[in-house]
Amino acid sequence: MAASAEVSKEREGHLCDGFLDRLSGLINKENVHLILSEQDGMLETLEVANEKLSHLNALSEKCFDLHVAEFRTYTQTLTSMKRELDSVFRRIR
């Protein structure tokens, strides 16, 4: 039984090899090279775009940090002004 399984696997291997040989005969090698070169071009374009987006992200992060600090300062100023105004209104009453 083990021998017949080995013969069956060997036969499947030969059938697969034959199928792959026929399939590779149908493929136009020039088209494959054209596709590969187009993919290389797209990859290069995407890498450049990724680099630009990374740079933009870094700049955006710096601007965000700057504006968050300014916003905190303005919030503290407004909070202290509100306290002072509340104090003035209490004294007026």
Image (cartoon, rainbow, N blue to C red):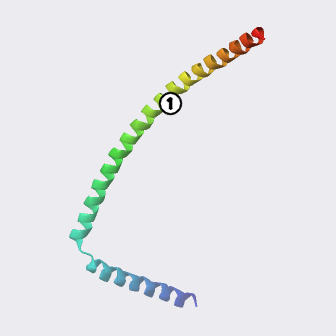
Query: What is the secondary structure assignment of the residue under circle 1?
Result: helix
x and y, in percent, of residue 2 in the image: 57, 87
The structure residue drawn at horizontal position 48% and vertical position 32%, both measured from the top left corner, is 61
**Front-most of residues 65 and 42:** 65
Q: Residues within 10 Å of mark 1 (few under 14, many from 20)?
A: few
Looking at the image, residue 10 lies above or below residue 87: below
In the rendered image, the residue lying farthest to the left is: 30
State the residue lying farthest toward the top: 91
On screen, residue 74 versus residue 93, left or right, reads left
Residue 45 against residue 67 in the figure, above or below: below
For this rendering, which residue is in front, 26 or 86? 86
Q: List x then y, in percent, for residue 52.
A: 36, 40
Judge by depth and name the residue closer to the eye, 8 or 35: 35
Left/right placement of residue 47 relative to residue 12 reads left
Residue in front for this viewpoint, 7 or 19: 19
Q: Quadrant of the N terminus?
A: bottom right
**Percent from the top left, x then y, of residue 81?**
65, 15
Residue holding disc 1: 64
Q: What count of labels does the image hold?
A: 1
Residue type at mark 1?
A: Phe
Residue at 41% x, 39% y is: 54
Q: Is residue 45 left or right of residue 61?
A: left
Residue at screen point 35% across, 47% down: 47
Query: In what quadrant of the picture does the C terminus appear?
Result: top right
Quarter where residue 23 is shown: bottom left
Query: What residue lies at 35% left-to-right and 45% top-to-bottom?
Result: 49
